[in-house]
Image (spheres, grey):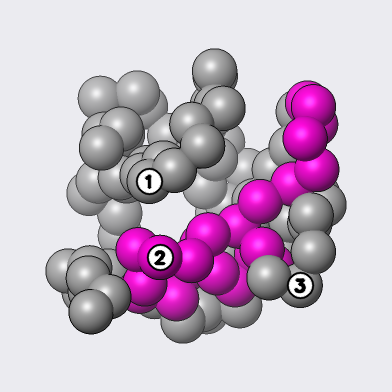
């Protein structure tokens, strides 16, 4: 049985990414509320990005990043878009699970 995640703002929202390994690892898989699926890029990819559209301006109190399998992430930066401008989210609001 697949484990379901706690409800989060990004579940089932439109997603885009810098690249995708295959349809099985599409950006939407990062936000599908299923711990057995994931977004993935080609092996040896560097500087990849993943974007989710929450649909409207939304207060964010915390971001959780989960690498269930194949942990390859060495660094990350979370940015939020306000109007047409983006800004980094402060590190204290990010939790790596």
> Principal SS element in the magenta part?
loop
Mark 2 / mark 1, whichever is N-terminal: 2
Query: Secondary structure under badge 1?
Result: loop
The one nearer the camera, 29 or 70, is 70
Farthest residue toward the front?
1
How many numbered marks are there?
3
Residue 59 placement: quadrant: bottom left
Q: Is residue 40 magenta?
A: yes
The one nearer the camera, 37 or 13, is 37
Farthest residue toward the top?
74
Structural crowding at the residue carrying mark 1, measured as other residues with C-alpha within 10 Å and reported as few (<14), some (14–19) or many (≥20): few
- Quadrant (top left/top right/bottom left/bottom right) for the N terminus: bottom left
Asked if the residue under mark 3 is in contact with the one under mark 2, i.e. CB atoms within 8 Å, the reply is no
The picture places residue 83, in percent across and down from the top left corner, at: 61, 60
Question: Label 2 to label 3, Cα distance in Å?
Answer: 15 Å
The image's mark for residue 83 is: none
Q: Is residue 49 left or right of residue 2?
A: right
Residue 60 placement: quadrant: bottom left
- Quadrant (top left/top right/bottom left/bottom right) for the C terminus: top left
Q: Which residue is mark 1?
A: 68
Asked if the residue under mark 1 is in contact with the one under mark 2, i.e. CB atoms within 8 Å, the reply is yes
The one nearer the camera, 38 or 60, is 38
The picture places residue 61, in percent across and down from the top left corner, at: 22, 49
Asked if the residue under mark 1 is in contact with the one under mark 3, i.e. CB atoms within 8 Å, the reply is no
The image's mark for residue 23 is: 3
Mark 3 / mark 1, whichever is N-terminal: 3
Q: Which residues are magenta?
A: 25-46
Q: Is residue 96 left or right of residue 40?
A: left
Q: Which residue is mark 2?
A: 36
| Image: 68 above or below 26 | above
Q: Report whether residue 21 is seen.
A: yes
The one nearer the camera, 96 or 70, is 70
């Amino acid at each position: 049985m697949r484990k379901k995640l706690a409800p989060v703002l990004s579940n089932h929202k439109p997603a885009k990414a810098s690249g995708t390994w295959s349809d099985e690892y599409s950006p939407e898989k990062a936000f599908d509320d299923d711990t057995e699926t994931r977004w993935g890029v080609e092996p040896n990819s560097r500087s990849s990005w993943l974007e989710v559209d929450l649909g409207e301006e939304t207060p964010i109190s915390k971001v959780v990043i989960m690498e269930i399998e194949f942990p390859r992430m060495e660094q990350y930066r979370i940015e939020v878009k306000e109007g047409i401008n983006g800004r980094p989210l402060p590190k204290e609001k990010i939790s790596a699970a």
